[in-house]
Image (cartoon, helix red, strand yellow):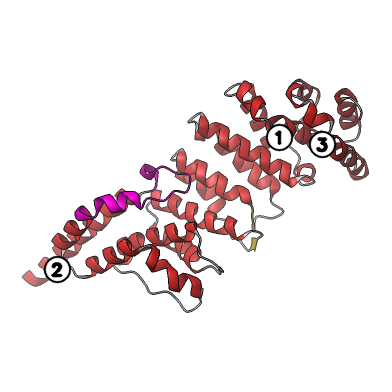
Amino acid sequence: MESVEALVAHIQGLSGSPDELAQLHGLLKQADGDALRVHSAGLLPFLSHLHPGAHSLGYLYLLDSFVSSSANLRAHAGGDLLVTVADFLTSCSADQIRMAPDKFLNVCRVLKNEVMQLNAPIRGIAPLRAAVRKIQTSSEQLTPLHAEYLMLCLLAKQYKAGLSVLEDDIFEVDQPKDLFLYCYYGAMIYIGLKKFRKALELLHNAVTAPMSSLNAITVEAYKKYVLVSLIQSGQVPSFPKYTSSTAQRNLKNHTQIYVDLSTCYGTGSYSDLETFIQSNAEAFQTAYPRLYLPPSLLGTTSCYFSIYMLYITKESVSKIFMAQ
């Protein structure tokens, strides 16, 4: 195998035309399991000889090899590496990185993990937003990066930033899990913005999407669906006919405490609702979602408060009408 120096020279000389890039891609694939992996610890300095926009394909291969080593990440945690990755994601050529989408996704996930470990999710928002647009073939395509991006927006409490992808009309979905996570995290964004109708639309999609077996994302989505439905309309709609039989048979069994909450709400007694929530406080705590977000960011407490306030409002309105 040629030296890393020779490979860098090929990257510099073969990053122009489509034919050159195809030739370069062949060389990079050959090197990927040999020189790049073996010498990954020494690859970072070579990136300074490449331009992230003009030499995106080769740059991606070197960067992916470097960040795929946990030892390299530990050695450079919180340093210039994060800046290097962020600059690449914002500057790279979409056409070139789409030639190696798995490597691009890996680099993006490394960035997400690093900013989370640094407790600085806001640092990943702009780079991942750019990455979503680079990997998309059209604005109608849902990518694995959508959920990663929305999760960072939630962690950073930058809810409005999430709208940049949520306002797109999605018609192309490759992996079902991407859709479930997109709907769940997107709904959390809308809950944070108190746009409950929009949140319900996404939660509804997560609950009624076709599925052969029940998944944890759908279970957590249904819990939020119950809460937001009570806030929005005071009742939880029954499953539409097109809901999968799997969801209809199993969802309520996995979310019984939320079903009971809805039933208690329907009695019209504020005191009974308050007693129910207080007596089941521990159960609600253990029912928090485990989808990479701490409970404090998931809005459940805010949902209960909103339900309380809705009851107070309804009772006040009823008293006004009775007094007339």
What's drawn in magenta, residue-wise?
278-298
Q: Amino acid at mark 3?
A: Gly
| Front disc: 2 or 3 | 3
What is the x, y in percent for residue 225? 39, 62
Crowding at label 3, few (<14), some or many (≥20) Cα neighbours within 10 Å?
A: few
Query: Which residue is under mark 1?
Result: 91
What whole-number distance in Å separates the C-alpha atoms at marks 2 and 1? 59 Å
Residue 57, position as x, y percentages in the image:
80, 38
Q: Can you say which quadrant of the picture contains the N terminus?
A: top right
Among numbered discs 2 and 1, the one appearing first in the sequence: 1
Q: Which residue: 71% across, 41% down? A: 104
Residue furthest left as drawn: 323
Kindly tell me whether residue 324 is visible in this rendering.
no
Residue 224 found in image quarter: bottom left
Which of the marked residues, 2 or 3, is nearer the chain's N terminus? 3
* Alpha carbon separation for disc pair 1 and 3: 26 Å
Give coordinates of residue 237: x percent, y percent.
Answer: 37, 72
Lower position in the chain sequence, tag 1 or tag 3: 3
Disc 2 secondary structure class: helix
Residue 152 seen anywhere in this rendered image of the structure = yes
Residue located at (56% from left, 51% from top): 165
**Residues marked 2 and 1 touching at CB (< 8 Å):** no
Q: Which mark is residue 33?
A: 3
User: What numbered label is drawn on residue 318?
Assistant: 2
For the C terminus, the image quarter is bottom left
